Image (tube, rainbow, N blue to C red):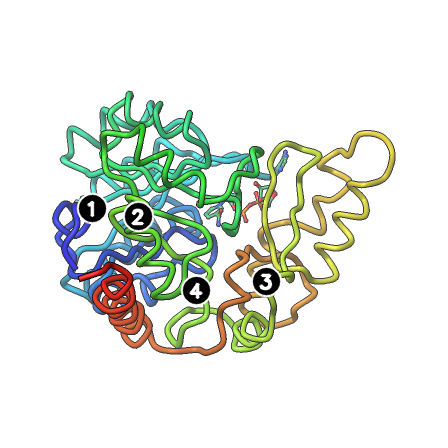
Amino acid sequence: MQTRLTEMLGIQHPIIQGGMQWVGLAELASAVSNAGGLGIITGLTQPTPEDLFKEIARCREMTDKPFGVNLTILPTIKPVPYEEYALAIIDSGIKIVETAGRNPEPFLPGFKAAGITVIHKCTSIRHSLKAEKIGCDMVSVDGFECAGHPGEDDVTNLILLPLAAKRLKIPFIASGGLGDGRGLAAALAMGAEGINMGTRFMVTKEAPIHAKVKQAMVDASELDTSLIFRSLSNTARVFKNSVAQKVVEIESKPGATKFEDIQSLVAGVKGRELLDGGDLDNGIWSAGMIVGLIDDIPSCEELVHRIVADAEQIIGERLRQILPV
Ligand code: NAD
């Protein structure tokens, strides 16, 4: 499959592994890149910009294919020196960056001067148009199905992707609810140049998280995610465990919820312990609705090849047969 995504990024298959806090380490990013997709190291998972610089160097030892770095700008418990992380990315020689959260405009001059291709993750068409206007090279259109932060509009990819096809000039990729060949074929049909997957890549052999977390996602249905932080306008889709249910319960009490009321439950460090140790009720972890379609734990190579082969079969056979000869 050749699309503007594969051409612009110099990759074999139109599949990206998006940024995932605590999951986007060199092990996963290199495995995805070696499989012919684009692996992405999650910047803020590294405790300091210097650590990010070293993680990028470590990833280079594990793959000679292109990979990128994610820089997410969202509310955090501790202040983050974003400028320093951006400089570490530039100094490392990385050529592909996925930005997410807030408007990445302050970072664009530095990234552009370094010849970096910027893919901005957007949960709405107005943000996508803005990303195009400020000079992003591509957008990753993140539907309501997605893990992590879907925004506050609750519009699914069946609407967002055709809208993006109608209104954007720059290429876009589909993100959220993608994890199989049907999804890839559908995203391409709706005008996307490829797909971005997070949750699906968490459930692979190389994902650096505990086997119990992977198994919980295999066992889960499409109903097993929860939306938290709605009351704080920082909505996040996470796996529906006892902690997520407790947070939703606290948020639904009369009166305004203060972040302090839930901070100890949702802190990223607790989520990291959960992903490392496998205690499924230690904190929260991001998971998308795609958990309902995940039923195995393949290698990244097996997964990427299966998705591409299935999509090719759908496009070349099923869709072709629908047209009269
Ligand atoms: P953290 O421990 O600082 O915060 C935990 C969660 O609480 C995060 O979802 C954060 O957005 C939210 N939060 C923090 N302060 C808040 C406030 N004042 N009001 C409302 N919500 C608040 O986060 P972390 O685990 O160290 O992650 C760092 C950042 O990277 C977070 O913003 C996280 O969401 C983001 N991130 C998200 C994704 C994703 O969407 N999958 C990927 C990469 C990074």
As drawn, the label of residue 94 is 1
Label 1 CB less than 8 angstroms from ligand 1 = no
Residue 105 lies, in percent from the top left, at 33, 24
- Residue at 52 percent across and 52 percent down: it is 147
Q: Compute the Cα span from label 2 to label 3.
A: 29 Å
Residue matched to label 3 = 222
Cβ–Cβ under 8 Å for marks 4 and 2: no
Cβ–Cβ under 8 Å for marks 1 and 2: yes
Task: Tell me if residue 148 comes above or below residue 295 in the rendering.
Answer: above
Helix or strand or loop: what does disc 3 sit on?
A: loop
Name the kind of residue labelled 2 in the image. Val
Please indicate whether residue 108 sits to the left or right of residue 140 in the image. Answer: left
Label 4 CB less than 8 angstroms from ligand 1 = no
Judge the density around disc 4: few (<14), some (14-19), many (≥20) Cα neighbours within 10 Å. Answer: many
Residue 202 lies, in percent from the top left, at 45, 65
Judge the density around disc 2: few (<14), some (14-19), many (≥20) Cα neighbours within 10 Å. Answer: many
Please indicate whether residue 214 sits to the left or right of residue 184 in the image. Answer: right
As drawn, the label of residue 200 is 4
Residue matched to label 2 = 69
Please tell me whether mark 3 or mark 1 is closer to you in this view.
Answer: 3
Name the kind of residue labelled 3 in the image. Glu
Q: Compute the Cα span from label 1 to label 4.
A: 25 Å
Judge the density around disc 1: few (<14), some (14-19), many (≥20) Cα neighbours within 10 Å. Answer: many
Q: Compute the Cα span from label 3 to label 4.
A: 13 Å
Specify the quadrant of the image occupied by residue 90. top left
Name the kind of residue labelled 4 in the image. Arg
- Residue at 32 percent across and 71 percent down: it is 300
